[in-house]
Amino acid sequence: MKLPCTSSLPALLLSGIVLFAPNSAPAQVAPGSPAYTPPAQIQPTASYGTQPTRTSDVPIGLFQGQSDIGNTQVPGDARYNEGTKEYTVTSAGYNTVFIRDEFRYLWSRISGDVSLAADITFPDPNGYEGRKAVLVIRQSLDDDSKEAAVAVYGNGSFRLGQRPRKGVRRLDMEYRVWSREGSGNPPARISSVVMPQRIGLSKYGDAFVLLISVQGEPMHPFGEPLILHLDGPFYVGIGFCSNLPDKSDVATFRNVVLETPPAQPR
C-alpha cells in the first residue's frame, strides 16, 4: 500500500515540526515563579501508584463504553447530546505522554482498519495550556498500554505519537501551524498558533496516519505515518486530560466519525 504524503496547507499558514521524547522531568522551581511547572508535568516513577481502571459498559453515542484510565484523583465524566451529536468530556489527570496515562476515555472495541475524526474545542479559554483532547487506538485499558494517539493541546499544537510497547514512555511528533502578519524580507512576524478545526487518526494495517483540516479544507494526511502493530480486538476512541492531577477541565468533540474500514488515503 502506498502511504500518504504530507499535504500543503493554505498559503497564509506555516507548519512547524518538533520531535518530542520526554527523557527527563522538568526542573522544579518555587510555586509563583514564572518558570514554575505544576505537578501535572512531573514524570511519574516506575512505582507511581496505580488503581484498577474504572469502566462503564453503558453505550454513549458511537462508543460502547467509557473509562477513567490511570490513577485519576478526580472521577471523570462524559455526556452525549443526541440532538447536537456533541460529546462533552470532563477529566482531571496529570498527563498522557510518559509511562502511564490519566484521562477519561470513550471507546469501542474492534478489529481491523479504522478511522476516527472529530472537531475539538475547549470551552474554557483560560484552561491549562498542556490540557489535551485525544483520539486514541490502544491495545488495552491499562494505564501503560501500547497505543497510537493524536492529541490537540490547549496551546494549539498537535501531536501524533505512540507507546511502542507496554510500560514504556510515549514518543511523539509535535506540530504547530502559525498565522503570519504582513510580508517582506525578513519574514513577517508570527502572530499566533492556529488550532486545527478538525483532526483524525486512521489505521491501515500497522500504519497510523494523522489527518487534519486547519481552516475547513478537506481532511488531508499530515506528517509521516507511524508504524505500530496492535492485535485485534483493540480499543478505539476519544478522550481528554486536563494535565492537572487534581483539577478537572472540559473538552468537546463534535461531528465525530468512526469508520471501519476507513476510506483509503489519496
Image (cartoon, rainbow, N blue to C red):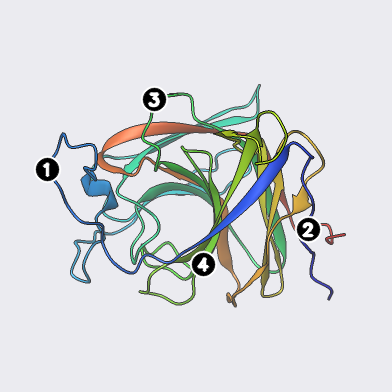
- Name which residue lies at 35% across and 63% down: 98
The answer, for residue 238, to whether it is visible in the render is no
Kindly indicate whether the residue at mark 2 contacts the one at mark 3 (C-beta within 8 angstroms): no
Q: Is residue 183 above or below residue 46?
A: above
Q: Is residue 15 left or right of residue 24?
A: right
Front residue of 103/211: it is: 211
| Label 3 crowd bin: few (<14), some (14–19), many (20+), radius 10 Å | few
Q: Earlier in the sequence, mark 2 or mark 4?
A: 4
Mark 3 lies on residue: 126
Q: Is residue 83 above or below residue 241?
A: above
Q: Quadrant of the N terminus?
A: bottom right
Q: Earlier in the sequence, mark 1 or mark 4?
A: 1
Q: Is residue 58 above or below residue 144?
A: above
* Position in image of residue 244 (x %, y %): 29, 41
| Residue at disc 1, secondary structure | loop
- In the image, farthest residue toward the left: 30
Kindly indicate whether the residue at mark 1 contacts the one at mark 3 (C-beta within 8 angstroms): no
- In the image, farthest residue toward the front: 185
Q: CA distance from mark 2 to mark 1?
A: 49 Å
Front residue of 122/77: it is: 122
Task: Name the mark nearer the viewer: 4 or 3.
Answer: 3
Mark 1 lies on residue: 30
* Position in image of residue 36 (x %, y %): 21, 42
Mark 2 lies on residue: 262
Q: CA distance from mark 4 to mark 3?
A: 28 Å
Q: Amino acid at mark 1?
A: Ala
> Disc number at residue 162?
4
